[in-house]
Image (cartoon, helix red, strand yellow):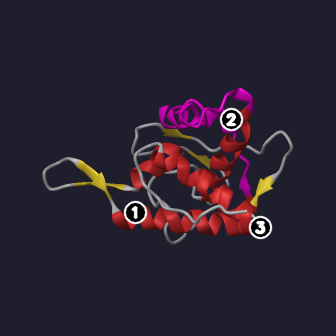
């Protein structure tokens, strides 16, 4: 599997040359395994399998986001599907997405990585365009993904959503 610019180049779900699934671990220590196609069998742009958004809901970062936006089980399905598609397009998981925006300081503490944050913001913009969204729908979808990061301590400023 070839790496895309801005995509994580560490261990991630994917496949080897023979097409066998590869399992790895992300920086959060969570095991990353490939997911199969959704029950509808729909593939994402770039032939990525549709992820199981219910698996994302087990992440503390995702739960924090859903609680912050007040999304109950019924309201959470669309934001989760959108985040799942974005994570699949970036070949990452929600915890690693946050980790991409962080860096270690010389003193050993954690700080926001400006280059990492810009990279993720560009990835959000590219993802929304690849989804075929335009205008207000594109702004809302991009800001929904940015909202996940914002509620996990990563500030990203998206365009205004004015109807």
The magenta stretch spans residue 67:
yes
Please name whichever residue, 108 or 124, is drawn nearer the observer in this view of the structure: 124
Residue topped by disc 2:
76
Question: Whole-Å distance between the Cαs marked 1 and 3?
Answer: 25 Å
How many numbered discs, if any?
A: 3
Please name whichever residue, 8 or 150, is drawn nearer the observer in this view of the structure: 150
In the picture, the quarter occupied by the N terminus is: bottom right
Q: Which segment did they paint magenta?
A: 48-74
Q: Position of residue 97 (x, y in %)?
A: 48, 51
Numbered label attached to residue 85? none
Q: Residue at x 68, y 49 (%)?
A: 82
Question: Whole-Å distance between the Cαs marked 2 and 1?
Answer: 27 Å
Q: Looking at the image, is mark 3 or mark 2 earlier in the sequence?
A: 2
Task: Decide: is 39 above or below 118.
Answer: above
Please name whichever residue, 138 or 55, is drawn nearer the observer in this view of the structure: 138
6 relative to 42 in the view: left or right: left
Numbered label attached to residue 132? 3
The local crowd at label 1, few if under 14, some if 14 to 19, many if 20 or more residues have their Cα within 10 Å, is some
Residue topped by disc 1:
116
The local crowd at label 2, few if under 14, some if 14 to 19, many if 20 or more residues have their Cα within 10 Å, is some
Q: Position of residue 76 (x, y in %)?
A: 68, 35
């Amino acid at each position: 599997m070839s790496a895309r610019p801005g995509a994580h180049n560490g261990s991630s779900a994917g496949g080897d040359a023979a097409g066998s699934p590869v399992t790895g671990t992300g920086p959060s220590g969570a095991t990353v395994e490939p997911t199969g196609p959704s029950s509808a069998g729909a593939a994402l742009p770039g032939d990525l399998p549709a992820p199981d958004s219910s698996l994302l809901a087990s992440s503390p970062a995702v739960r924090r986001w859903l609680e912050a936006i007040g999304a109950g089980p019924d309201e959470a399905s669309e934001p989760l599907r959108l985040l799942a598609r974005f994570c699949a397009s970036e070949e990452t998981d929600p915890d690693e997405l946050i980790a991409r925006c962080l860096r270690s300081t010389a003193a050993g503490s954690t700080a926001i990585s400006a280059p990492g944050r810009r990279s993720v913001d560009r990835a959000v913009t590219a993802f929304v365009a690849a989804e075929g969204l335009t205008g207000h729908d594109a702004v809302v979808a991009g800001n929904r993904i940015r909202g996940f990061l914002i509620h996990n301590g990563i500030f990203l400023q998206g365009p205004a959503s004015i109807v």
